[in-house]
Image: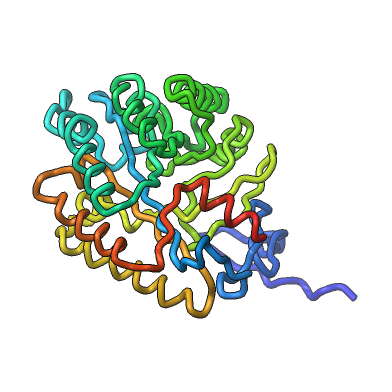
Amino acid sequence: MSRPPIEQKENKGETLNEEYFIYPHRSYGMDHKRYKWSLLKDRKHINWPSEKKIALWINVALEFFPLDMPAKPFKALGGTVTSYPDLRHYTLRDYGNRVGFFRVSKAIESAGFRNVTVAFNSEVAQRYPYLVDYVNERNWEIIGHGINMSHLSYTGLDYQKEVENIKLAIESLEKISNKKLKGWWSPSRSESWETPDIIAKHGIEYFCDWINDDMPYEFSTSNGNLIAMPHQHWISDAMCYLHYKHKEQDFIDQAIDQFNFLLRETKSYGGRIMAITIHPWASGQPHRIKALETVLNYFAESNEVWNANGYEIMQHWKKQQ
């Protein structure tokens, strides 16, 4: 039996026909095939090593902001904002790689943590090779973070150009660091529709761009599955200080509140991941380093923390799926 015809409606003088109301992907769950829809509360409980409740994932971003950053598609958070040459902002970001990073590193190690994930713009590795040596000496994880903060992926960028950018970023960083990259964080989390497919083709196993979950999940690409990791966008010093213009105490409160809530949630739903994102040009300032120290020391006081890098957390999660 055929359906009765749908009444046509007027919209700003244009007639909408019946096909306008037919959505071919309407169904229970997601309207794409990138990942399966599921409720976090219904998923299998995860157990971290030594029966710890929280996997602490410390992320440090080492970024280079060119002096002549293009406005298209947008300027990444922290990019130049005044007329060229914007030496004030350019040198402040450079400060993070020469000065602030070592304060951040000291704060992490003073709190007793030894496992860190460091996201490198490949241009940072080229310009500041001592940072690569420093990270390698501590056996910290290195993940890709694009060429620099002006080389963004977005739909509208020529596909071959995006492939070249990602390939260059990965291969040059692997050559300089003498490490095979397993993880990827797009500059400013900017992606085109094809970005996950491209990074998977170049050997990446997990990525940090999607902030739609608190636990890892499988993400389908044309080159096999990636793991989408819950890399924090909100518990990020740069977002707090620069984007929202919050005070240092706000950053402390937000990080500690998130940690405490996740810890309480583990009683009902199993292990959780506490990710924190640190930019040395933000937290490495003399007036802000105390805030980072306070947060890290608070984490260290808990007996429920397993400190690991992103790849270790991902592997442990995968083994229990």
Please, which residue is most extreme toward the front here?
50
Where residue 183 appears, x then y in whole percent? 51, 40
Q: Say which quadrant the N terminus sits in.
A: bottom right
Q: Residue at x 20, y 60 (%)?
A: 294
**Front in this rendered view, residue 244 or 134:** 134
The image's colouring method is rainbow
Please, which residue is most extreme toward the bottom here?
268
* Count of numbered marks: 0
Please, which residue is most extreme toward the right here?
1
**Front in this rendered view, residue 251 or 69:** 251
Q: Residue at x 38, y 39 (%)?
A: 118
Q: Say which quadrant the C terminus sits in.
A: bottom right
Where residue 44 appears, x then y in whole percent? 63, 69
Q: Is residue 117 above or below residue 121?
A: below
Where residue 50 appears, x then y in whole percent? 50, 63
Res 84 → quadrant: top left
Query: In screen coordinates, is 70 left or right of 186?
Result: left
Query: In screen coordinates, is 247 left or right of 278?
Result: left
Q: Is residue 181 above or below residue 126?
A: below
Q: Residue at x 43, y 31 (%)?
A: 146
Where residue 295 appears, x then y in whole percent? 24, 60
Q: Residue at x 79, y 75 (%)?
A: 4
**Front in this rendered view, residue 116 or 87:** 116
**Front in this rendered view, residue 265 or 114:** 114
Q: Is residue 45 above or below residue 117?
A: below
Q: Is residue 19 above or below residue 142?
A: below
Query: In screen coordinates, is 141 left or right of 246?
Result: right
